[in-house]
């Protein structure tokens, strides 16, 4: 079953700005789906329309078969939304915020209080339950928004940049939590600027730019289209002199006396690089990708999409 | 959504609203007591003794219902206007908008909050009036309760409409300052409209607040410048118009959805 189905979705804001230009998107039940795009691409507008915070101009949206136009109440019950901005009342306590949110979904107060204990404990906020939300750290506020979105037990969780401004340790613990609830059956749609996050968590991905979907596929398949990667190599040699190796057939950039960047085509392989370095008595101390692989693809796809549009316009 | 879901959502908004104004009781419940005490002292005790009777009642007694109603109007209006606008401003209105809460439930929840605050303030001001007026009698309890509930509802709805349109905090203070206060002062709180000369009495009768103050005064003292049936008709009609307006605006997403 499709958790989300979007057909020819368009949004033109007052003033004529066309945020969405007829996008189509399907997300299967149980998926962990990434919606990526540069700022202003249309991600938040799409999420806003799905969660009925933004009125669409044209098109159809359905969530687990419930139509946005004709079955709005049932559709809303399926969705838990974690927005980009902190949008809770900063003067309410942590527990009031989550219990009230459940109340809006018709969850009886007693049930909501019991569930709040469960989710606040899972997200490490139970000790803060009686604190006003304004007293929480940024990371705690992010977790509070996740707890709030889960209290009515939705089937589809939409997270709009949930780990923005969150430190690495907390981000990874949030990833673990999201993976865990996804395994329990909750479909997750995630927008993020951390492409590593999408690569780590998500199975499928759509890239949106200037109101159109420029790619919609599985992460695995997308990564196979990557033709070239750049590696950073830290080198050493017994004589401790500056190392400036020559590696035939590869583009090499010298970063400092002991570090180089090498562009490697998918067809070339790394063995030739190592062989040539060994022949020059150079040891490779460490090696890493220069950029996240998905990041390179993302930039490439967005640039290709824009070039194609520019060419069509010309 | 079934009626039990709707009731739970309504109760949630209502509890949230009541918790909000009770949390800041020094800003919401104490000022009316102080302001009305000053009115009683200045207009009742000091000026009132020189005025004598009005509509066959001592002046101090005459102004009690009007002052209670003035507090009810101001507090019901400002409660909903400030609460709803704050929710818009801080974006926590989105908590409700993403949930399956129907528009009538949102309206009823906010109006319910305004109503409770207005009733609490009405009780506080009534208790304050007891320290200045020895014999405050209630002639028509039913009319009294009906009027205060309908008036609170009416101005809660008005505050909601104001907040829906408001874009800045200034926008929610313009209406109370430039419309509500003049209408209230000219609505027969401190005088009987029968004292106004010719055309001005006719003009005064176009002021809806006059009907609310007089219906409430009738419930308290049994005297009124207007027929009670007319007064209740006007109040109910305004309630219907304001409810339909608020409903239409929220359904269309005016001020809350892009």
Image (cartoon, grey):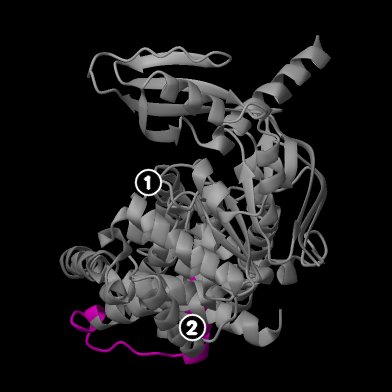
- Which of the two discs, 2 and 1, labels the residue nearer the N terminus? 2
> Within the magenta stretch, is there residue B139?
yes
Callout 2: chain: A
Residue at 55% from the left image edge and 34% from the top image edge = A295
Image spot of residue A232 (x, y percent): 42, 27
Q: Is residue B204 above or below residue A227?
A: below
Q: Report the magenta stretch's main SS.
A: helix
Report helix, strand or loop for mark 1.
loop
Relative horizontal placement of residue A211, taking residue A250 as reference (left or right): right
Give the CA distance from mark 2 to mark 1: 29 Å
Residue under label 2: A112
Relative horizontal placement of residue B147, taking residue A86 as reference (left or right): right
Q: Is residue A22 above or below residue B95?
A: above
Nearest the camera: B119 or A26?
Answer: A26
Nearest the camera: B250 or A148?
Answer: A148
> In this picture, which residue range is highlighted in magenta?
B128-153
Residue at 53% from the left image edge and 45% from the top image edge = A192
């Amino acid at each position: 079953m499709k958790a989300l189905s979007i057909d020819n979705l368009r949004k033109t804001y007052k003033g004529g700005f066309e945020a969405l230009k007829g996008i189509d998107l399907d997300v299967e039940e149980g998926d962990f789906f990434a919606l990526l795009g540069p700022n202003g691409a249309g991600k938040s507008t799409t999420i806003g329309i799905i969660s009925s915070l933004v009125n669409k101009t044209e098109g159809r949206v359905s969530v687990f078969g419930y139509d946005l136009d004709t079955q709005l109440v049932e559709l809303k019950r399926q969705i838990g939304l974690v927005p980009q901005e902190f949008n809770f009342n900063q003067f309410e306590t942590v527990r009031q915020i989550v219990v009230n949110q459940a109340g809006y979904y018709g969850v009886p107060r007693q049930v909501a209080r019991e569930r709040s204990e469960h989710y606040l404990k899972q997200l490490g906020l139970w000790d803060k339950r009686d604190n006003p939300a304004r007293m929480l750290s940024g990371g705690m506020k992010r977790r509070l928004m996740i707890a709030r979105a889960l209290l009515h037990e939705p089937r589809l969780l939409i997270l709009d940049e949930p780990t923005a401004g969150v430190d690495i340790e907390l981000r990874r613990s949030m990833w673990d939590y999201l993976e865990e609830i996804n395994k329990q059956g909750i479909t997750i749609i995630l927008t993020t600027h951390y492409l590593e996050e999408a690569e780590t968590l998500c199975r499928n991905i759509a890239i949106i730019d200037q109101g159109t979907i420029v790619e919609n596929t599985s992460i695995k398949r997308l990564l196979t289209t990557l033709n070239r990667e750049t590696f950073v190599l830290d080198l050493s040699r017994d004589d401790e002199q500056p190392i400036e190796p020559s590696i035939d057939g590869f583009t090499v950039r010298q970063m400092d006396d002991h570090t180089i960047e090498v562009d490697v085509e998918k067809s070339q392989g790394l063995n030739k690089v190592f062989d040539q370095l060994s022949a020059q008595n150079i040891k490779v101390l460490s090696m890493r990708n220069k950029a996240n692989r998905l990041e390179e693809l993302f930039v490439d796809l967005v640039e290709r999409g824009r070039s194609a549009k520019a060419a069509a316009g010309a | 959504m079934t009626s039990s879901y709707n009731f739970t959502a309504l109760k949630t908004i209502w509890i949230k609203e009541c918790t909000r104004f009770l949390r800041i009781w020094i800003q919401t419940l104490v000022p009316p007591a102080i302001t009305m005490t000053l009115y009683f002292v200045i207009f009742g005790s000091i000026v009132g003794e020189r005025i004598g009777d009005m509509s066959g009642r001592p002046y101090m007694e005459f102004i009690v219902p009007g002052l209670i109603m003035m507090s009810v109007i101001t507090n019901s209006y400002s409660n909903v206007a400030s609460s709803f606008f704050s929710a818009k401003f801080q974006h926590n209105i989105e908590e409700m908008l993403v949930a399956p809460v129907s528009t009538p439930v949102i309206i009823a929840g906010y109006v319910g909050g305004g109503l409770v605050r207005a009733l609490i303030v009405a009780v506080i001001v009534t208790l304050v009036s007891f320290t200045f007026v020895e014999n405050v009698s209630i002639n028509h309890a039913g009319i009294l309760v009906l009027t205060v509930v309908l008036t609170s509802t009416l101005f809660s709805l008005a505050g909601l409409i104001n907040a829906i349109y408001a874009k800045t905090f200034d926008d929610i203070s313009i209406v109370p300052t430039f419309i509500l206060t003049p209408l209230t002062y000219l609505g027969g709180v401190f005088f009987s409209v029968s004292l106004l000369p010719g055309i001005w009495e006719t003009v005064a009768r176009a002021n809806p607040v006059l009907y609310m103050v007089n219906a409430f005064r009738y419930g308290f003292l049994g005297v009124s410048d207007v027929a009670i049936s007319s007064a209740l008709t006007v109040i109910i009609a305004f309630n219907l118009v304001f409810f339909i307006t608020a409903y239409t605006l929220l359904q269309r997403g005016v001020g809350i959805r892009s």
